[in-house]
Amino acid sequence: MLIKNFDALNKTPQRKICLELIDAALASIQPQNIIQKNFSLTNNTLTIRDKTIDLNRFERIFLLGFGKGSAGLSKHIENILGNLLTEGYVIDLQPNSFSKIEITVGTHPLPSENNLSFTKRAIERLGNLSEKDLVIVVIAGGGSALFESPYKINLEKLIEVNESLLLSGATITQMNIVRKHLSKVKGGGLTKLLYPSTIVSLIASDVPGNDLSTIASGPTVKDETTKQEALEILK
């Protein structure tokens, strides 16, 4: 059971039913179960949900992961791809062990020099890709803080803005609109940096409604917002 004190809480038949329902829900979102259900490899054909990708088209396969829980997801992907994976880079709040992926422990909910250094290194390593390259991007909640390359703003000011947003009562969508316009990698910025490779985004949503442009500030999703919207939110 994932609920460690299940026996202590299981006092009545009604409680047992509720606890079993909760435990089943928790089990369904464990990284291994998610990947096993949605990500498989057969004869160099990668199947992700209802999409298939012929890996024979590519000379190299990279993985880039960021967000809370991204390391667990990336670990299972690495196990499936095996030697087909060229290299990878992941930043999460908890360490993990990998064969071909470099793991960095970052900070959340505020960005840090560690987060910025990881992003810079990952971009540098993945900055010279071609159409023969495939990049699997694993995105999870918290990616807005963990994966960051500021645009025309230093780290000190970036932290100040993020602290103010967190205390403002703004929704996650509003906060991430502001964050997009202060970043080189948010709001589709990462996609530009990885061009012309083929990009596959595996996104674990922590946003009500699952708006892909809001989760981790949409690094691989086109940004439809404007600077004026960001300014209005700040006001």
Image (cartoon, rainbow, N blue to C red):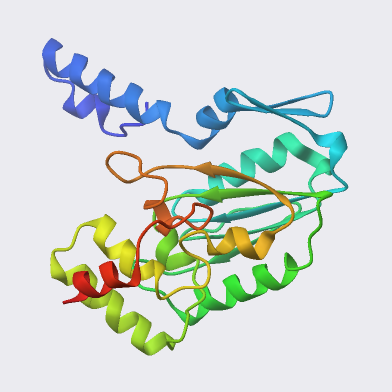
Query: Measured from the top left, where is residue 83 in percent x and y?
Result: 84, 43
Q: Quadrant of the C terminus?
A: bottom left
Q: Determine the residue positioned at 81% across, 57% down.
A: 130
Nearer to the camera, 29 or 63: 63
Q: Tell me: residue 2, above or below residue 77.
A: above
Nearer to the camera, 36 or 51: 51
Q: Residue 7 vs residue 169: left or right?
A: right
Q: Tell me: residue 166, above or below residue 151.
A: above
In the current view of this chain or complex, which residue is farthest to the top? 13
Q: Quadrant of the N terminus?
A: top left
Q: Residue 105 vs residue 13: left or right?
A: right
Query: Measured from the top left, where is residue 134 in percent x and y?
Result: 75, 47
The image quarter in which residue 4 lies: top left
Q: Determine the residue positioned at 33% across, 26% down.
A: 25
Q: Total of numbered circles in the picture?
A: 0
Q: Tell me: residue 121, above or below residue 81.
A: below
The image quarter in which residue 180 lies: bottom left
Tell me, yes or no, if residue 158 can be seen here: yes
Q: Determine the residue positioned at 55% across, 23% down.
A: 37
Tell me, yes or no, if residue 90 can be seen here: no
Q: Tell me: residue 153, above or below residue 148.
A: below
Q: Residue 140 vs residue 234: left or right?
A: right
Q: Residue 20 vs residue 182: left or right?
A: left
The image quarter in which residue 174 lies: bottom left
Query: Measured from the top left, where is residue 26 in percent x and y?
Result: 35, 30
Nearer to the camera, 214 or 115: 214
Q: Determine the residue positioned at 75% across, 38% down.
A: 81
